[in-house]
Image: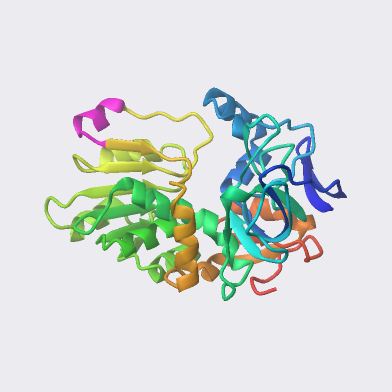
Amino acid sequence: MRAAVLRGGTFTVEDIAAPEPGEGQVLVETVACGICGSDLSAYKHTAEFLQASIDSDTPSFVFDPDADLVMGHELSARVVRTGPGVTGFAEGEVVVGLPWALDGGGVLRTIGYSNTFPGGFGERMVMQAAALVKVPSHVPAHIAALTEPLAVGFGNVARSGAEKGGAAIVIGAGPIGLGAVAGLIERGVAPVVVSEPSPRRRALARAFGAHVVVDPAETDPFTAWREIAEPGQPLTVFECSGKAGMFDRITYAAPRGATVLLIGVCMTEDTFRPVVGIYKDLTVKMCLTYPPEEYPKTLARIAAGSVDAASLVTGQVGFAGVAAAIDTLGRPDEHVKVLVRPHLEGTGVHPADA
């Protein structure tokens, strides 16, 4: 199969052996795969990414950087065939799935961050049947790939406990932050204030239902919130930017008793003054992904049209364009979500409807 292979810090498009499904697994062919901020970290900051995985005792994110790695975990795919013990899936069915699989020793591995389990930047993948969800026929197969990043936003809103009567601030309006906005609006949280420097992403935040959207270079989101919030209204802050120093700023700006969720991944060491948050009795949650049940719920939202997943897709690339497309994540004015599509050729970014 063809794949964008990362080896020793460099992407090349190569023909490699396709994986074979084992017990309880399904072989699928990639329809589309989103490029995630974690992919940027693993590609550009490999040593830090791996050290964080080791320090946090997270073996599912550990790989050999000098061996072949096919990244990609925000995916939609078609069933090719099933492994032993798998029933209920037919060839050609479109599926999405939580990006994990069990190796021969029963150890959980993350698809796309494993030398053994290639991800969606290749033509074929092996996925655990228990992790798959069938995509309704009316949902465009490539748009279903947005299930995973949106589930992070929706899932962490569910985890936060934010509900009607409370207010929220979302810092960063990438796909995860936008998923959080949609989840907050769904729960009746108001007002929802979004802070985002990119005009393109601010426009999407408004479209997703945010009540107030600010450019942080001009308006502090906490100032904007205080101008419209009800006295004593509980506040939940969703940090979705991953920028160094942001948590420290939040501890100073947040009101007493606020809840703060750290969702954006900051790969560097950071500092904050604990006593400020302690004196304010802040509740802090650090969140990797989402409760598993939120994944099929998010696909159901996409299928029902209650969240406009297609509006997040701003470009598409083939395997040869993966490296350049990952670089665009550092320039958020250019794109929101770029999908990798196996059928596309060339190194450039194709339109969202290609």
Q: Is residue 142 above or below residue 123?
A: below
* Residue at 36% across, 30% down: 272
Q: Is residue 311 above or below residue 272?
A: below
Q: Is residue 136 above or below residue 79?
A: below
Q: Is residue 112 magenta?
A: no
* Residue at 68% across, 47% down: 85
Q: Which residues are magenta?
A: 274-282
Q: Is residue 107 visible?
A: yes
Camera-nearest residue between 86 and 207: 86
Q: Is residue 280 magenta?
A: yes
Residue 270 image position (x, y, % from top left)? 45, 30
* Residue at 58% across, 44% down: 38
Residue 288 image position (x, y, % from top left)? 47, 40
* Residue at 73% across, 64% down: 91
Camera-nearest residue between 22 and 311: 22
Residue 20 image position (x, y, % from top left)? 78, 46
Left or right placement of residue 246 versus residue 89 in this view: left
Quadrant showing the C terminus: bottom right
